[in-house]
Amino acid sequence: MFIRSAVFRTLLLVITSIIVLPVASQFAIELADDFGIFGQPVDSAVNFLLAITDNSTFWAVLWVMLGFTSGVWFEYFVRQLKITIIRPDIPTRTKVQFTAGSTGHVLLENENVARITAERVLVGVSDENGSNQDHIIIWYVFLVFNRPTHYGQIVVDAGNATIPEWQVISATYHSAIVRFNGDIGNVALEIKTISAKK
């Protein structure tokens, strides 16, 4: 039943395209000619278009607009296809050992990271009267990549250890900044990029 209806629809489409549409379009043209629609207004419009296309400024503007539009579409398709010739997906990771109560860190492993800096910041928390009652600790980890890399996201892996809530507050092809909302204890943190293809 489905095959028959599909064949019938295809046959109807072919008949409409070959027979009905040409007859209907010819009828519409003759009707418009009888009412004078294809008279003076159409001739004026055609003459106006011919006058514009004879102008050299028109062609210069047209080529500039076509070039701009082509560039925009090319950039869009490059992004959609994730063609990363200039910035390929280079595996990037670092592993850092933190010590509870210390502002220092020890670099354990490194891949495509030129420089890493970790800053421990003490932030005062005030009540509604404006007096400081408590302090919170925030860690900022700054990464500068050795080579620019195209990646999907940055993740933090601490194995089974408990670490504060973290978030990536800046991520570019060249660097990244990760913030930890709390103090980092005795833990080895691995910060790495995840491929955009995954």
Image (tube, helix red, strand yellow):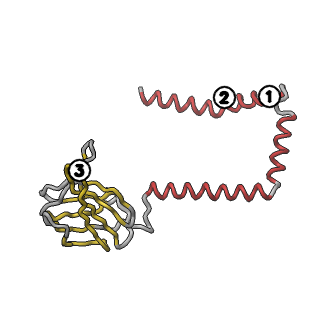
- Position of the C terminus by quadrant: bottom left
To which residue does mark 2 refer?
Answer: 20
How far across and down, in percent of the image, does residue 36 sit?
85, 28
Looking at the image, which residue sits at the far right? Answer: 40
Q: Residues within 10 Å of mark 1 (few under 14, many from 20)?
A: few
**Label total for image:** 3
How far, Cα to Cα, is label 1 from label 2?
A: 18 Å
The image quarter in which residue 83 lies: bottom left
Q: Amino acid at mark 2?
A: Val
Q: Nearer the viewer, mark 1 or mark 2?
A: 1
* Residue at disc 3, secondary structure: strand
Q: Amino acid at mark 3?
A: Asn
To which residue does mark 3 refer?
Answer: 132
How far, Cα to Cα, is label 3 from label 1?
A: 84 Å
Q: Amino acid at mark 1?
A: Ala
- Identify which residue, 59 or 178, lies in the foreground: 178
Vertically, is 99 above or below 19? below
How far across and down, in percent of the image, does residue 55 sit?
81, 55
* Residue at disc 1, secondary structure: helix
To which residue does mark 1 refer?
Answer: 32
The image quarter in which residue 192 lies: bottom left
